[in-house]
Amino acid sequence: MAQRSIHVLRQPAATPSRWPPLLFLHGGYVDARCWLPHFLPYFASHGYDCHAADLPGHGRSEGRACLDRLGLDDYLADLTPVVEGLGSRPVVIGHSMGALLAERLLERSLAEAAVLLSPVPPNGTLESSLSLFLRHPGFISAVATMSSGVFDDDGMRLLRDIYFTPATQRDELLRLVRIVQPESARAIAEMAMLGWRWPLPRDDPRSPLAELCRAHPRLAAAQRHGCSDGGNGCRPDGHGIRVEDDAQAGGSGV
């Protein structure tokens, strides 16, 4: 199968340094523009060459027509040439589904280190999804409606209550909804059943791996644990830290 072209946003370091490049991987239902407001400028100003990739079928990358047939391994296969083209192994910073892909890049020794922001639970998303559905019966239909580009007050309120903090302002949410898009049905199913996957052993298990897990209390309760096993930096904040105004604080934590 032909390799899909992957679009990458790039922001060079403000001053040359010896730091490894940074590769940012977005979560589900959005694209690489979620890193533009805070994270790319922050790290570029601190001497890092920054690269944020649109996953296949997202943003300006190829694959939108066959999005629902793309799984996590397809995302990884199309990302691999991007990683190899950076010149040196990057530190990968992934959010949610992107954090899962960052872990798999580490499994394949394609990354120098990884930082996982609000990662997918080790046992997958099935339990948390069922819990959210029971607590918020309109959640699934609201996600489908918003991913098709339709937003109403009820949907915006649900988005804020589940994924962000109560203090999140409407204009902050609007910055996110402008880049919301459909997600692969296959990738969603694979994340739900993640607990059935046997992880690959890493060539170098000493590769640095840090987790910053900022789960809103409702989402954390649904997941039972706010982060993957062994994580650190957990705090009761919004899962959607990509666009909120306090994302610079998250950048300093990274």
Image (tube, rainbow, N blue to C red):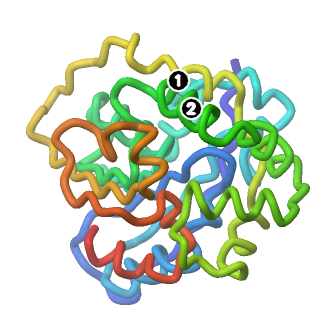
240 vs 158, left or right, is: left
How far across and down, in percent of the image, does residue 100 sit?
A: 42, 37
Label 1 with label 2: CB-CB less than 8 Å: yes
SS at mark 1 in the image? helix
Question: Would you place residue 69 above or below residue 168 in this image?
Answer: above
Question: Would you place residue 81 above or below residue 217 in this image?
Answer: above
233 vs 204, left or right, is: right
Q: Quadrant of residue 244?
A: bottom right
Residue 139 in view of the camera: yes
Instruction: Name the amino acid type tagged 2.
Output: Ser
Residue positioned most to the front = 135
Q: Identify the residue shown where x is 72% and y is 47%.
A: 58
For the residue pair 52 and 244, the one nearer the viewer reads as: 244
How far across and down, in percent of the image, does residue 42 sit?
A: 41, 82
**Mark 1–mark 2 distance (CA, rounded to whole Å):** 8 Å
Instruction: Name the amino acid type tagged 1.
Output: Ala
Q: Identify the residue shown where x is 25% and y is 79%.
A: 17
Q: Quadrant of the N terminus?
A: top right
Q: Identify residue for label 2.
A: 129
Badge 2: few (under 14), some or many (20 or more) residues near its Cα, within 10 Å? some
**Earlier along the polypeptide chain: callout 1 or callout 2?**
2
How far across and down, in percent of the image, does residue 8 sit?
A: 61, 58
Q: Quadrant of the C terminus?
A: bottom left
